[in-house]
Image: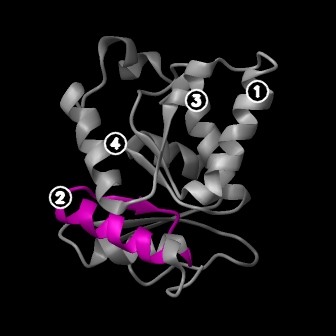
Amino acid sequence: MGPASPYYQTALEIARRLSDDGFAVISGGGPGIMEAANKGAYEGNSPSVGLNIELPREQHNNAWQNISINFRHFFARKVAFVRYADAYVILPGGFGTLDEVTEVMTLIQTGKTRRIPVILVGTRFWQGLLDWMKEQMVGNDTIEMQDLELVQLIDEPINVVNAIYAFYEERDIVPSETEHPSSSFL
């Protein structure tokens, strides 16, 4: 998804708003939506971080990174995403994006990482997956309905930023006693 894509423009705006508000923005460091996130942050006030993955094709580092870290394996990269995030803002993507969404939902659900906002951006893209999870996973008792409350579905960039602030207005940014780092895998 290049600059002509509405999702690219949305990622650019969200990242710029978060960067201007003091959040470092971390992306997968590649092209498309990842590039938009890095570019938005790079043009803002806070660091733009790319967690790049070495792949035989497809992935290349985008030019909009103040900090660029290369990973050879996906699992190590996912640990870095989880360890340093105060919110997950996830726009449409492929299998890697789907893997990262379900990984973070699993880690929060099982108490292996602290609860932070998980925001899916793009109702048209994500709603079918959430409907399937409700129908099949909740319907077959493989997850509970409350597990789907781990994510929010939001379309407007300003509402994404507001949702992150609303979350932290209700609780402290540091882990609670039950989320203490010594009880997690990190």
| 58 vs 128: above or below | below
Determine the CA span between mark 2 and mark 3. Answer: 28 Å
The residue beneath circle 2 is 21
Q: Is residue 159 left or right of residue 136?
A: left
Q: Circles 1 and 3: CB distance less than 8 Å?
A: no
> Dot 3 surroundings within 10 Å: few (below 14), some, or many (20 or more)?
some
> Which residue in the protein does label 3 denote?
148
Query: At label 1, which amino acid type do we have?
Result: Met
Residue occupying image coordinates x 56% and y 47%: 78
**Relative vertical location of residue 17 with respect to residue 165 in this rendering, above or below:** below
Looking at the rendered image, the disc whose residue lies closer to the viewer, 4 or 2, is 2
Q: Give the range drawn in magenta.
A: 8-32
Question: Height in image: 79 above or below 138?
Answer: below
Q: Residues within 10 Å of mark 2 (few under 14, many from 20)?
A: few
Query: What residue is disc 1 on?
Result: 137
- Residue 5 visible within the image: yes
Q: Which of marks 2 and 3 is nearer the N terminus?
A: 2
Q: What residue type is labelled 2?
A: Asp
Choose mark 1 or mark 4, whichever is in front: 1
Kindly indicate the quadrant of the structure image that contains residue 41. Answer: bottom left
Marks 2 and 3 close (CB-CB < 8 Å): no
Q: Please state which of the two labelled residues, at mark 3 or mark 4, is closer to the viewer.
A: 3
**What residue would you read off at disc 4?**
86
